[in-house]
Image (cartoon, grey):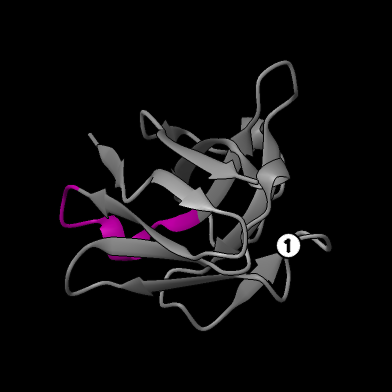
Amino acid sequence: QVQLVESGGGLVQAGGSLRLSCAGSGSTFSRLSVAWFRQAPGKEREFIAFITWFGDGTYYADSMEGRFTISRDNDKNTVYLQMNTLKPEDTAVYYCAARAEFSAARVSSSYAYWGQGTQVTVSS
């Protein structure tokens, strides 16, 4: 069973930065593709970024590329999301998700494992 735990969320002023972490349990973590999603109140869950098993491939939503960077450290069983130049519209609950398949996926239903989410609030 895979468990994912997000951390690093909080309150930040517009223009600031945060780094979110997604810690995974189990020896199979390095064989899981991982993505970050977010969900704002009253909105659908939105894809942010994806990273392959070994971190050699990354994919971003068009609107996120340039400000957000996904990375991973398999020795620490952790995937990161570095978020820069944050805007009030980035306020949401941020989730990491994982799947065994190697290929990239932008649809939330493609992911079997989810964390509980971490709140990010950006003040203006």
| Count of marks overlaid on the render | 1
In the rendered image, the quadrant that contains the N terminus is top left
Q: Residue furthest right?
A: 62
Q: Please name the residue shown 82% across and 60% down the image.
A: 63
Picture coordinates of residue 3 (x, y %)?
A: 25, 37
Front residue of 123 and 67: 123
Front residue of 51 and 100: 51
Specify whether residue 4 is in view: yes
Q: Residue furthest bottom?
A: 56
Specify whether residue 99 is in view: no
Q: Please name the residue shown 66% across and 53% down the image.
A: 48
Asked whether residue 31 is drawn in magenta, I would say yes
Q: Quadrant of residue 115?
A: top left
- Examine the rendered structure and indicate whether residue 91 appears above or below residue 24: above
- Residue 51 relative to residue 78: left or right: right
Task: Count residues near mark 1 (Cα–Cα under 10 Å), then give few for <14, some for 14-19, many for 20+.
Answer: some
Picture coordinates of residue 21 (x, y %)?
A: 33, 56
Residue indicated by mark 1: 64
Asked whether residue 33 is drawn in magenta, I would say yes
Q: Quadrant of residue 49?
A: bottom right
Q: Please name the residue shown 75% across and 23% down the image.
A: 43
Picture coordinates of residue 110 (x, y %)?
A: 62, 38
- Examine the rendered structure and indicate whether residue 47 appears above or below residue 15: above
Where disc 1 sits, the SS reads loop
- Identify residue type, mark 1: Met
Residue extent of the magenta highlight: 25-34
Q: Please name the residue shown 18% across and 47% down the image.
A: 25
